[in-house]
Amino acid sequence: MIGPGDGFGAPLIGPPLPRRDGPAKVTGAARYATDEMPPGLAHGVFAESAIAAGRIRAVDAAAARAAPGVLAVLTHENAPRLAQVGQQGQAGRPGQSHMPLQDAHIFHAGQYVALVVAETIEAAEHAADLVRVEYEPDPAGPRARFEAHLDEAEVPPRIPLIGTPPVESCRGDPEAALAAAPVRLDLIYRTPVEHHVPMEQHGTVAAWDGDRVTVWDSTQHVYGVRSIVAKFLALEEEQVRVLSAFTGGAFGSKGSSWPHITFAAVAAREVGRPVRIWLGRRQGFVGAGHRSPTLQRMRVGAGRDGRLQALLHEAVGHSSPYDAFSDATAVVSRMLYACPAIRTGHRIVRVNVNTPTAMRAPGEAQGSYALECAMDELAAELGLDPLELRLRNYTERDEDEGGKPYSSKALRECYRQGAERFGWARRPLAPRTQRDGRWRVGQGMATAVYPGKQSPASARVTLLPDGRAEMATATQEIGTGGSTALAMVAAAALGLPLDRLRFAYGDTRLPRAPVSAGSQSTASVGSAIRLAAEAALRRLAALSGGAPNPTAWAEQVANHGPVSGEATYEPPDKDARTHAPHAFGAQFCEVRVAEDSGEVRVARWTGAFGCGRIVNARTAHSQLLGGIVWGIGMALLEETHLDARLGRFMNRNLAEYLVAVNADVPVIDAFFLPDADEAVNPIGAKNVGEIGICGAAAAIANAVFHATGRRIRDLPITPERMLLGTGDAAAHAPSSA
């Protein structure tokens, strides 16, 4: 049990319990979506477009249809017509509004031009190679690099992420305040295309029973998949059942429904037997979104004491020709520091790529990089310690929400304890003052912040005659240990040991749960579980005529049969809430930069975080580590190369798309501070899944500057950029009035 009584008078940092699904995963007993093998299972493989822009003139699929084991070949000429489904917002929106195999248009390289269904995956892959397509390329060629078309940038109609923050914001008179500021900076930062590359690739199995279809999918949102499949196939939602027992990594790419999911159901209906579609590693780069690149202009005005007077953050990214996707890149600048005049805005440029999508901390990761580097540059311009500068601009209220107090904010203590454990006080103020042989040594820091997102969620808790309990909700286990943390919430509310709880999840026949994204699942679903547990206890008390006693449940419940309570948690909307919910943290790192090769190594890391109640200290700590490791990859390694002439992603594999591995990662000292939050939700939990990446790349870039005196503003900070000077500060010098 988490603690005495109802469990919520327990310490703010819960016990470090191992994941309940761990044994099944390490022994191979866990069944993922594409492990399902219904009788008669066939396999689908997509053939891809060889061009990035144009039309299909003709398709020759004769050889593919004649290949051994082939059951069907679908192209735009013979594929069933699907219903039109536009973007619906994060909760159950299609990953892209244009569905392939519906017309002759080619919008991006790798677009699906045929679907081969065969007896085996080998036969399907072979036949897909036999499909011959004749194209009419766009005479102008593909539009690949969005920065070449900035004059065509447009304001997107909305930011399709949880909470849908406004596209633009303004308070005060930022331009006048900037012009009057004694110190002004005008800075450009760039982040590249990145891909999610989860360990488990995207995959779906679909099987029909009459006019009903069952879909096993690797997803972050079973209800979202059900909604989209039903809409594309013109079915009632009750005709579609979606199951997802385990998801082996997602990071946003599985938060939306992509074409392969619907086409698994389409193909299964066409051939009259179950069909599995699994996207190989290369197809994952074109079939399931990516992080949009950004060009961010930061204009900062401050007094000579370091206090901000104006902040203007403008972000431009790319999107597909048919969708207007934008990350919330500039939103972080609206609320993190005290400033009387702020303007933020987002624009997109449509180019020949597939639609981008949410990727861990979508917008916050890129936006915090630009903001926190700009704060470091301001500190250097003023000769101030970067931590002192942040403290001078500290605020206890969210000025973007009209000055509402934060539901809790432990950031000041994060700064203090993080700096103490890291040894920040020993850091020399001037750059290029520390050396160890061929290595220049530097220390950097940044603030981390992530909003406390929440969505409506439902759950059912049933008390059983044997003294056990069962909890049920359609949430997803996406590899974070969330199912363990949620079971701990129920155990605390019921006063039961964890091993006396059964947990049913990942099935659209269970009470509705939101997408497992935005670091919201524990806060949202956990609150619903607590409310459902309390409802079950109240019902048992009413039936038995007294307060329920967990040790007497078997007897009490046996007299009435199983006793259930069901509840829905409805978080207040932004306008109705009295407090602004955010989690905060402070990142500190030390880097070593080789002067002869430009190599950057992260040598030390300390991160201090305040994230409300931490239900499971072990799994939550693991999430911090994962986010920080991803921040190291974001800063130094990750970049998908888009060929400007061909419009193709060129490094569609894990040999050339580089991610951080053990050799890149130091020992990470990451820890939580007690952060009582009585206002945010019934269990006091905020978020831990994404805050670890926020500010991490900036801390590294700031440490590189401190080590070398060179400011690299374009990510990733590769040896080439260190040696050749691309993306450095020379083109955008600060100015003082």
Image (cartoon, rainbow, N blue to C red):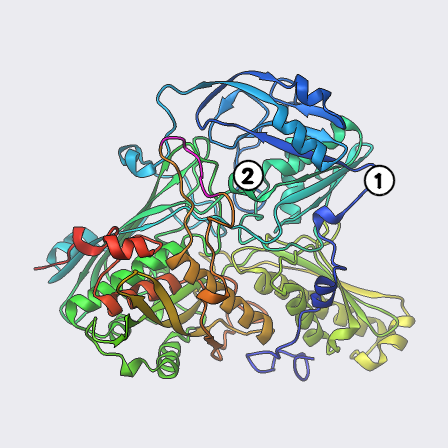
Visible residue check, residue 278 = yes
- Reading the image, the residue beneath label 2 is 287
| Badge 2 amino acid | Gly
The secondary structure making up most of the magenta span is: loop
Range of residues picked out in magenta = 645-651
Q: Residue at x 71, y 74 (%)?
A: 491
Magenta run includes residue 462: no
| Badge 1 amino acid | Pro
**In which quadrant of the rendered view does residue 366 lie?**
bottom left
User: Tag 2, which secondary structure?
Assistant: helix
Image position, residue 196 (x, y; %): 51, 50
- Reading the image, the residue beneath label 1 is 39
Image position, residue 720 (x, y; %): 30, 53
Image position, residue 70 (x, y; %): 74, 26
Left or right: residue 66 versus residue 649 is right
Find out whether the residues at labels 2 and 1 contact each other: C-beta distance under 8 Å. Answer: no
Q: Residues within 10 Å of mark 2 (few under 14, many from 20)?
A: many
User: Tag 1, which secondary structure?
Assistant: loop
